[in-house]
Amino acid sequence: MMKSGTYYVGDLCYVMNDRWDEFCALTIVGDKVLDGEFNLADGTRFATFTTRWGDGTYRDEQGREYGVDAGLIGCIAVEDISPEELANIKDGHIVEFVQPFSTWSAGGEIRIGNILIDTDYTEVEEELEEEY
């Protein structure tokens, strides 16, 4: 569970520049990338999940776009982002979660609290083909 608060939701490579090596050490084991919730050595908690098709642009159920350059979408509290990184946020969104929330990923869908992001283009393409 993640605690309530204001979060950046998007590709964490945009907001963890000075902690990227530690991020990778926690989330990459051998040739496997781990999904889930993690804590940095300083206590910073974040969630990260790989997208189904890597880099690209994905949308949530409200139509908001998430640009991805590191093949992942996650969340981290805004208070844990440096002012410089916060000023240069791109391709993600600042979201207020008024209650503690869960995160998970399955079948290309990433759930961060009440946000659902489908990263599996094939399902969307198949649905469009069926319509025509």
Image (cartoon, rainbow, N blue to C red):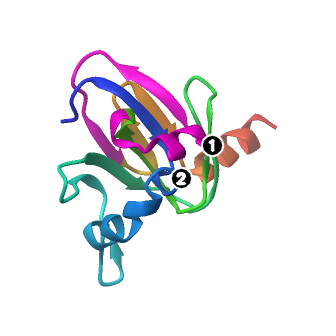
* Residue 104, horizontal then vertical, whole percent: 30, 43
The amino acid type of the residue labelled 2 equals Tyr
Q: Can residue 118 be seen in this view?
A: no
Give neighbour class at mark 2: few <14, some 14-19, many 20+ (Cα, 10 Å): some
In the displayed structure, 127 sits above or below 94; it is below
Q: What stretch is highlighted in magenta?
A: 79-105
- Secondary element at image label 2: helix
Q: Which residue lies furthest to the top in this view?
A: 98
| 56 vs 131, nearest the viewer | 56
- Is 53 displayed left or right of 129 in the figure? left
In the displayed structure, 29 sits above or below 118; it is below
Name the residue beneath numbered marker 1.
Answer: 90
- Secondary element at image label 1: loop
* Residue 123, horizontal then vertical, whole percent: 59, 47
Which residue does the image show at 22% across and 57% down from the upper left?
A: 40
Which residue does the image show at 24% across and 47% down from the upper left?
A: 44
The amino acid type of the residue labelled 1 equals Lys
Give neighbour class at mark 1: few <14, some 14-19, many 20+ (Cα, 10 Å): some
Report the quarter where the N terminus lies. top left
Which residue does the image show at 58% across and 41% down from the upper left?
A: 89
Which label belongs to residue 14?
2
Q: How far, Cα to Cα, is label 2 from label 1? A: 7 Å
Which label belongs to residue 108?
none
* Residue 35, horizontal then vertical, whole percent: 31, 58
| 113 vs 98, nearest the viewer | 98
Q: Do the residues labelled 2 and 1 touch (CB within 8 Å)?
A: yes
